[in-house]
Image (tube, rainbow, N blue to C red):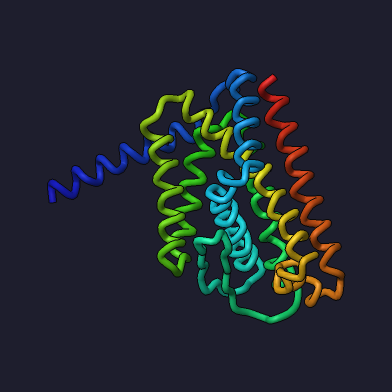
């Protein structure tokens, strides 16, 4: 009983420390750090070898957005699978057509950009450390819906890295990581949309989200791709503006 009491006390202390760090605003970092993280994230997205590795993060955000949209529209979430080729699939049960299915299909490609936009807002308000812990929490919630080993590995590695940064590294490293992750989500949301249209033009993505939406709404897939690009590009401009305005 005493051991259990000690464990609960220690766990409470740890959670209290995390909560205090998460809700305590911090001053904006030097503009040079913000710009350096912006350049780093952009280079990672543009350089093919690094993009192949880090694109898994965008896939996690993509599938998480599908899952959240499904739940918010009343569909029953069956599970998420993440694959080593950076593809993924989210399975939900409900009406095969209608508003819920349209929102669920639409959410995937815009999800990373919208998440990045929310992260940019938190950075603007000074909650860089809170952003890292919030992502850890979201990954923990996502973990229970993963249905394959590679997916479990991807989410666990991502969450473990963020816990390491948030708990053990100095504030400067935490700040840099928060800004790098946010810039990466913003920039990284755009490239898959462009890649999608390239694949569609070659006839290799006939079951893509855009084509599923075309089948559901009778609106051409190219228009859905354009809307994906409008949302993700707008997120870069708005979110990037928030970050730079707070840092300069």
At 58% from the left and 33% from the top, the residue drawn is 179
Left or right side of 130 for 105: right
- Coordinates of residue 120 in the picture (x, y in percent): 65, 37
Q: Nearer the viewer, residue 91 or 124?
A: 91
In which quarter of the view is residue 67 placed? bottom right
In this rendering, does residue 114 appear at all? no
What residue do we see at 86% from left, 75% from top? Answer: 218
Of residues 206 and 66, the one nearer the viewer is 206
What's the residue at 37%, 37% (across, down)?
16
Residue 201 in the image: state x and y as whole percent: 80, 65
Relative side of 163 to 178, left or right: left
Q: Residue furthest left?
A: 2
- Left/right of residue 54 with respect to residue 241 in the rendered view: left
Position of residue 190 relative to residue 88, above or below, is: above
The x, y position of residue 183, in whole percent, is: 63, 37
In the image, taking residue 208 as reference, residue 61 lies left or right, namely left
Q: Position of residue 121 (x, y in %)?
A: 66, 37
In the depicted view, which residue is nearer to us: 168 or 184? Answer: 184
Q: Decide: is 231 above or below 198.
A: above
Which quadrant, please, contains the C terminus?
top right
Q: Is residue 173 above or below residue 114?
A: above
Residue at point 53%, 49% (across, down): 53
Foreground residue among 12 and 132:
132
């Amino acid at each position: 009983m005493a051991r259990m009491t000690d464990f609960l006390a220690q766990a409470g202390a740890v959670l209290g420390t995390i909560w205090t760090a998460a809700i305590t605003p911090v001053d904006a970092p030097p503009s040079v750090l913000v710009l350096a993280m912006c350049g780093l994230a952009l280079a990672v997205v543009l350089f093919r070898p690094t993009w192949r590795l880090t694109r898994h993060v965008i896939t996690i955000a993509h599938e998480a957005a599908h899952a959240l949209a499904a739940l918010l529209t009343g569909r029953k979430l069956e599970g998420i699978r993440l694959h080593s080729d950076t593809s993924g699939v989210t399975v939900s049960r409900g009406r095969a057509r209608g508003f819920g299915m349209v929102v669920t299909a639409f959410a995937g490609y815009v999800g990373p950009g919208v998440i990045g936009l929310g992260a940019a807002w938190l950075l603007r308000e000074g909650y860089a450390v809170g952003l890292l812990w919030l992502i850890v929490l979201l990954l923990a919630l996502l973990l229970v819906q993963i249905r394959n080993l590679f997916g479990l590995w991807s989410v666990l590695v991502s969450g473990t890295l963020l816990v390491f940064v948030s708990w053990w590294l100095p504030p400067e490293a935490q700040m840099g990581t928060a800004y790098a992750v946010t810039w990466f989500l913003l920039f990284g949301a755009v490239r898959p949309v462009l890649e999608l249209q390239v694949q569609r033009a070659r006839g290799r993505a006939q079951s893509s989200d855009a084509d599923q939406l075309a089948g559901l709404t009778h609106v051409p897939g190219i228009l859905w791709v354009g809307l994906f690009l409008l949302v993700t590009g707008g997120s870069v401009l708005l979110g990037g503006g928030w970050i730079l305005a707070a840092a300069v």
